[in-house]
Amino acid sequence: MLLATGCSDDSAGGDAYGGDSPGQQTTASDAASPKGSEAPPTPSPSDAAGKAFDGRTTDPCSVVTREALAPFAAQPSQPPPLPNGKMPPPRPAVMFSPGTTIQMCRIQVQLRQGSAADVRVSLGDKKADSTTGRPTGEPRNVAGYAIEATSQAAGSCIRSIVDRDGLMTIVDVATQPSVDGCPLADVVAETAAKRASEGQLKTARHPANSLAHLRACDLVDVPLLESAVPGINTNQYADAPGYACSYGDPRTTAVLVVLRLTAKPVIMDKGERRDDIAGRNTGIAPGDEKSDVLPTPHCRLSTEGPDFQGSHAEQVQIVVMSKQAKPEDLCASGEKLAQKIWPQLWKP
């Protein structure tokens, strides 16, 4: 099981894609067509999944367009005057920005009824047999993809798009104040499936030394891991497509390596210090079971690399956790791993 750790990226962000919708356009009427008028056939194993979403080469923000989201969005709002008295441009009701991984797009939508929706689309995020919540009902076939509905708490709705490789692209909608976000999640998922089947997804172009070209599990030296982290079971591991790798059991002892994005400027955690490890400026943040980040003794090490679309930076995190160890000892273990992993990053 992969663990969700580290600081969440809750920055408001900017519209990294400018004023135009990313990718080619689809019409709002097509994307927001009413459901239930025609019951789609239940997908069979042969046709349930279409062409795989490739999180390494696909621009995740090209899966949906502003036109598809227009039926849900409020009118652009006017921010207050600037200190010099001039009026800034209207703030769009739909804003695209990077998420917390290169494979993720974050879309913020100001809804007509006054709530705000935070939409996160993660390409090829999980295997279809992993846990994202309990599926409700039969999957629907849209353009050759199986779209699964997942039951969630109030104000949250998840749709999973299963491709032919058994990977799920996750559409996660959270609303505040809480309203039903499932109609919006349906439109995003269906638009993504249609655009993928029609070849309308944009290709992401990353620098040669970007994390997009690395796999987290390839960075881990297993013999070193076994010697640096006492008690870890390296036979138990999980690999989220490219960007995250975990070893061990989070209930006892585990290590997580994550290739991610972080908003700029980078904000240090409480108790975090900076040090030089293998020539890289490294954040070292110990925490105990009272931590808000992870409720078990742990240490998180992080280092930042090149800018990503101006608003973010590429970042690698190593998280070492164990119920049987002190945070300072876990930091020492993490430093040994960083000495091996950091030199593999962002090579010229």
Image: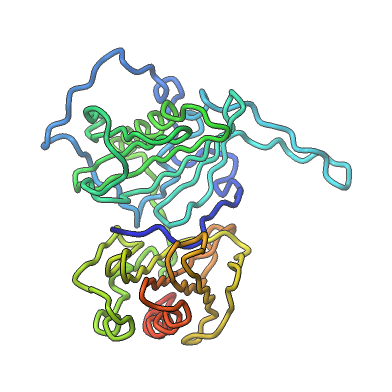
Point out residue 265 in the picture as x, y percentages from the top left corner: 63, 64
Compared across the picture, whether 116 is left or right of 205 comes to right
The residue positioned 77% from the left and 41% from the top of the image is 88
**Residue 6 in picture, x, y percent from top left:** 47, 62
The x and y percentages for residue 179 are: 51, 28
- Residue drawn at 27 percent across, 76 percent down: 232
Label tally: 0
Q: Is residue 235 above or below residue 5?
A: below
Horizontally, residue 215 falls left or right of residue 313, namely left
Question: Residue 326 appears in which quarter of the rendering?
Answer: bottom left
State the image quarter where residue 339 is shown. bottom left
**18 or 102: which is nearer to us?**
102
Query: Quadrant where the C terminus lies?
Result: bottom left
Taking 48 as reference, is 311 above or below it?
below
Q: Visible in this render: residue 20?
A: yes
The residue lying toward the viewer, choosing from 74 and 346, is 74
Residue at figure coordinates x 32%, y 75% from the top left: 219
Q: Position of residue 308 (x, y in %)?
A: 52, 61
| Residue occupying image coordinates x 88% and y 42% | 85
Quarter of the rendering occupied by the N terminus: bottom left
